[in-house]
Amino acid sequence: MSRARQPPLVTGISPKEGTAWTKVTIRGENLGTGPADLVGLSICGHNCLLTAEWMSASKIVCRVGPAKDDKGEIIVTTKSGGLGTSTVSFKLLRPERIGILEQSAVWVDEMNYYDMRTDRNKGISPLSLRPSNPLGIEIDKGKIQQSDMELTFPGMSGDFTSENFSATWYLIENHSGSSFEQLKSGASNLKKQATKKNEGSLAYVKGGLSTFFEAQDALAAIHQRLESDGTERVEGSMTQRLENILNRASDTADTLFQEVLGRKDKADSTRNALNVLQRFKFLFNLPLNIERNIQKGDYDVVINDYEKAKSLFGNTEVPVFKKVYAEVETRICALRSLLLEKLLQTPSTLHDQKRYIRYLSDLHAPGDPAWQCIYAQHKWILQLMQNCRDEFISGQRVGVGILDLEGDSRPLALGRLGHTASLKRGGSLRTPRPSTWRFETPQQVQFVEKLSDVVIGQLPNFWKLWISYVNGSLFSETGEKSGQVEKSKKNARQRQNDFKKMIEELTNRLVKLIRGALLPTTLPQGELNLYGGWENKTELTGAWLTQIIHTVRSCHDALSAMEIPNDLLQVIQDLLLELRVHCLMVTLLHTTEDVKRLAEKEDWVVDNEGITSLPSQFEQCMVHMLQSLKEPLEIKPGEINVLQLDQVQDQVSELSVSIMKVFINCLDQLSTKTDGDIDHNIAVDLSSPDRFAAIQEGFSPTSEQRLLIILSNCQYLERHTFLNLAHHFEKHGFTGTEKITRVSVDAVRELDRKLFEAYIERRADPIAGSLEPGIYAGYFDWRDCQTPTGVRNYLKEALVNIITVHAEVFTVSKDLVPRVLSKIVESVADEMCRLMQCVSSFSKNGALQARLELCSLRDAIATYLNTESNSSFKLALDALPQLHSGGDKKLLEELLNKFKSSMQLQLTCFQPSSVQPVKR
């Protein structure tokens, strides 16, 4: 009949050779269904069933016995499969016998271990094995936490070799998923193993029963012999002799084996010491490992080892352990000092600070390392800020536009930006600068840049360190170590006001250092020595102040982004307000100086409209000034409009009016320059067909021409420039533009009136003054003259002089021609009226001659007659006798036509079509 299962087959054994009592692992197929199914196991012919431990159908663990064969097979016998076979063999090594007096370098494996609980050496029988699965069923490890089991079974253990073994704990831990039937099968297996071990021991006793009987007979014979020997002899009793023999044997043995036994005792103590060192090598090696790990920077390893040593040996009573642990504590104390020194060392990164604080916390360092670090960082940032100021004041940072901001090339770019802004604002109109001026950055600008970099670079990490301290993340990122976290939060709550004072001190220091460099008058006298000292540095322009405002704003925005409360940053807002006002005033003042220098740039080159480049330069200068003020006047979140402040409004209005008046004063000064003061030649726009070519390039403007050019500029200012500037002022938020425009227009009108009167006086007086001598030239008498034959030469000369004035004015500006000629004509008409009224009487011919000349003059300049000149001509004609004769009227008309015909070319300039102003 075929069996239910295949016979066992051994396919492997590990190790493949060894001495007696070597533990081996047998692997194969069909090695049984359980411990009860295994009925036989032999290695090299020796029965090893007593030490066999069935693990699974493919694995059995046992110890090799003292077999007689040196090499043999491994045979497994089971109930289900019968006698098995083997494809491998095991080689039994014979140990070399060593005499009692021979030295050996091989330790005898007595399997001693050191028990810390009893401080005793315990020997374990080589036959005793600790089965990993005593129930013989499949192990199903549960997922129950060890801490939960310890709470449920206090003082107990799931290790079945422990004195406090708990079967319930073991079953929950290893067989939580096993069925009840499987547990019953496991109990049966446990009983069978116990019965098998008992039967095995009894079999050994039965096999050696004859030996026990022989020993019993020998002891009985000796006892009987001793009892029968009761006589005393010379040598003494038998027991006495036996005692003496035994004593001599003992002395001889001591003599023979004293050295050997001494070495054995020494070896035993050495072996025991080595066992202890091996078992507790972690503690004995810990001081050296701590030193090595500290040198490598592996502080986490040191802390973990220390925590482990503290939990194991912190309360030990063993002297040697105490001594080694004390050495560990000494090294840890030195590590605390080292970590604290590294923590307080500056500069350092936020990551390193957090790391060192956690290390010190894990090492239970005294005090509060986190707060110590915060305090040290606060002092260091303050010192950095002060050192920054001291370096610039002492001249160690004499810069040419390059700041040592870790290779940052931005300051050079800032220098160029400032140069560009100053050009837009009219900076190019100042006195000449050295060839390197555009690459120079003022010391104050470099200082504010560097100071801002210090604050932005250090304060965020300082704030983040405090936030980590407040929320406890310094000690745990995952919420662990709740005790330390709660302690940190409690300490942070107690020190909240102290940290707020630190932030206030940092922001106040920043503001005071900037005030000392830019606004020293706003600091108390006692703080000037600490924060001032910039008196010898370059005065800043509005463009550089704008750059500083931009830097301070960036610093404020960076601090606001860290969610620092606004009340702690209010001092920076106040500083920004004062800097914006200061920049506004400085820009206006510097613009005033620039406008003063505009007169030096007057080249007297007029365009098609009679305007020089001066009004355009002035308007450009003002527009660039307003553009440069765009950023300072811009209202950022949390800021106020500086132009809404009453005091600022008044000052801005006064300075703006002052700029206008300064420019008008420049025009006035230009009008009073003598010919020797003129450095530039007058030029004409040759592209215009309406310009006379008589004025050549080498022609210098006369004082009258300068008056006309400035009058033309004044008209342009009134009609265009001031209106454009008013629009720009309003566009940039300036208030009081109506007042500025009104005062400016009044001032330019006053200058216009003054210059116009001066020009008329220079041109009209000579013409009017030449009339009377011309009339009475050759002793002419109105009462005794010949019949008129035409207009006399004095009148023609007067008209030519008027034409000359017309040409002079027309060359400069068409718009001025009607105004100037009207006034000239008015003066001439008034003079003619006076001369006619002064004549006592006219003859007939005299009256006709006078009427001819008055009508010729009136008709020639009729285009420029105004009410006053018409009135003057009417009064002059009324002073003459009336013409009653038709012949006289006809003669008058003929002579008038003759005059107009002869001077047609000269009088063409007075035609209305040629005096229309050009539209602008």
Image (tube, helix red, strand yellow):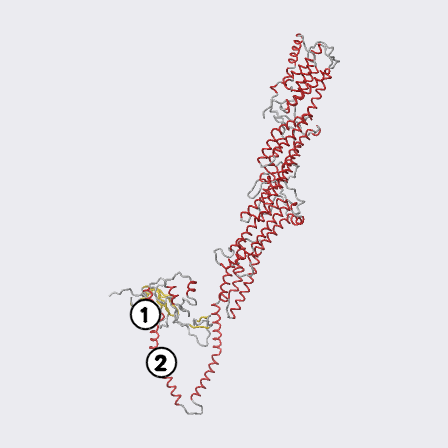
Figure quadrant of residue 709: top right
Residue beneath disc 1: 40
Query: Which residue is found at the position 49% from the left and 68% from the top?
Result: 277
Q: Quadrant of the C terminus?
A: top right
Tell whether 820 sits left or right of 5: right
Figure quadrant of residue 827: top right
492, above or below 221, in the image? above
Query: Residue 831, percent across and down?
Result: 70, 19
Query: Residue 779, percent across and down?
Result: 75, 13
Is 815 or 211 nearer to us in this picture?
Answer: 815
Query: Residue 568, percent across and down?
Result: 57, 49
Secondary-structure class at tag 2: helix
Query: Residue 22, percent across and down?
Result: 39, 69
**Label 2 sits on what residue type?**
Phe
Within 10 Å of the Cα at label 2, are there few (<14), some (14-19), or many (20+) other Cα atoms?
few
Q: Quadrant of the N terminus?
A: bottom left
Secondary-structure class at tag 1: strand
Is 323 or 215 nearer to us in this picture?
Answer: 323
Figure quadrant of residue 97: bottom left
Q: Do the residues labelled 1 and 2 touch (CB within 8 Å)?
A: no
326, above or below 430, in the image? below
Within 10 Å of the Cα at label 1, are there few (<14), some (14-19), or many (20+) other Cα atoms?
some
Can residue 304 be seen at all in this image of the molecule? yes
**Label 1 sits on what residue type?**
Gly
Tell whether 198 sits left or right of 406: left
Per the rendering, the mark at residue 522 is none
Residue beneath disc 2: 212
